[in-house]
Each structure stands twice: as structure tokens, then as C-alpha cells.
Image (spheres, grey):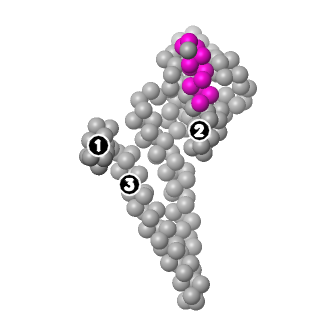
Amino acid sequence: MKLDEAKINFIKSWGSLGTKWGINKTLAQIHALFLIEDKQLSADEIMDILKISRGNTNMNVRILMDWGLVYKEHNLGERKEFFVGEKDLWTVFKRVIKYRKEKEFDPMLEVVKTYKNVEGNTPEAIKFKNQLERIEKFANEADSLLEKFSKMDESWFWNKFLKMMT
């Protein structure tokens, strides 16, 4: 397989994986492009490579910038914006965890806290409270683990992981 064909197939495959991770295909494809491309890319280049619209490109690049996975770079004398992707996979992993924790996990914890103080001592109310307490306990333990994960050094993580596997 030639390099150009392999790159395009990688981007397509990463896009398909993205849908399994709960993100849109185009977002994952743009991320894949930045993972494998060493040079800066303009929105026009992204559009041309992936055959997507300007609006789709801009929206998804902004999302990747919000996640800290893509950075804007300015070139002297250029009016175009150029972008470059984070290449360090440990950094990518930690930023994705941090973003998903803030946007998905923290709001879920807030919902549980809001409704766990329901009034009443009926069997149904007690079951409801107990279930929310179990959810909150699990969520707090998972939250603590995610927080530790996001602060770990990569070599420490792999050391601990390999010890668990042996």
C-alpha cells in the first residue's frame, strides 16, 4: 500500500472509530489528519484533503482547539490561519479525559446531587435515594480516578499498568 493511500485509509478508519467513541466522524477524521501530518494546515487544505465544507471544517477545528488537541499558528505575512495538531499521545489522552470529565461527568454529578435529597420515606423514595447514593459513590470514585489519571506522568502510568498485568 502506498503512503498516500495508507494515510487516507487511516483517516477514514479513525473517523469510524470516532463514532464508536461518541464523537462525530468528521471531527475524528480531522483529528486523525493532524495526528499524521507534520506540517501546518490551513482550513482550505483540510477541506481539500477531506473533501468537506468550510463550515464543517471550521466548526470541528474549533472543537479540537477547545479540547487542546489543535493549535492555531500565525505565519508572518499570511492572512490565512494555520493549524497544527498535538502529537504527544499521552497529552492527547489526558486532554480528552479532562474535556470529557468537564463536559459529561461533572454535569452528571450535579444532576445526582440535585435530586438525591428528595423528600419522603416511602419505600419508593428510599430506593430512589439509595440508587442515587450508589451512583454518586461510583461517580465520585471514578471522578477521583480520572483526576489522578489526568495528573499522572506517562512513565509512572505504564509502570503501574504493567505491574497490574503481571
C-alpha span from label 1 to label 3: 18 Å
Q: Residue furthest top?
A: 77
In this view of the protein, can residue 111 be seen by the observer? yes
| First reached walking from the N terminus: tag 3 or tag 2 | 2
Question: Horizontally, is 89 left or right of 43 in the view?
Answer: left
The part of the image, by quadrant, that contains residue 93 is top left
* Labelled pair 1, 2 in contact (Cβ < 8 Å): no
Q: Residues within 10 Å of mark 1 (few under 14, many from 20)?
A: few
- Identify residue type, mark 2: Gly
The chief SS type of the magenta part is helix
In this view of the protein, can residue 30 be seen by the observer? no
Q: Quadrant of the N terminus?
A: top right
Q: Which residues are magenta?
A: 2-13
Instruction: Give coordinates of residue 146: x percent, y percent.
Output: 41, 51
At 65% from the left and 32% from the top, the residue drawn is 26
| Residue matched to label 1 | 162
What kind of element bears circle 1? helix
Q: Is residue 28 above or below residue 83?
A: below
- Identify residue type, mark 1: Leu
In front: label 3 or label 2? 2
- Identify residue type, mark 3: Leu
At 59% from the left and 26% from the top, the residue drawn is 11
| Residue matched to label 2 | 18
Residue 135 lies in the magenta-colored region: no
| Residue matched to label 3 | 145
Instruction: Give coordinates of residue 9: x percent, y percent.
Output: 60, 23
The part of the image, by quadrant, that contains residue 4 is top right
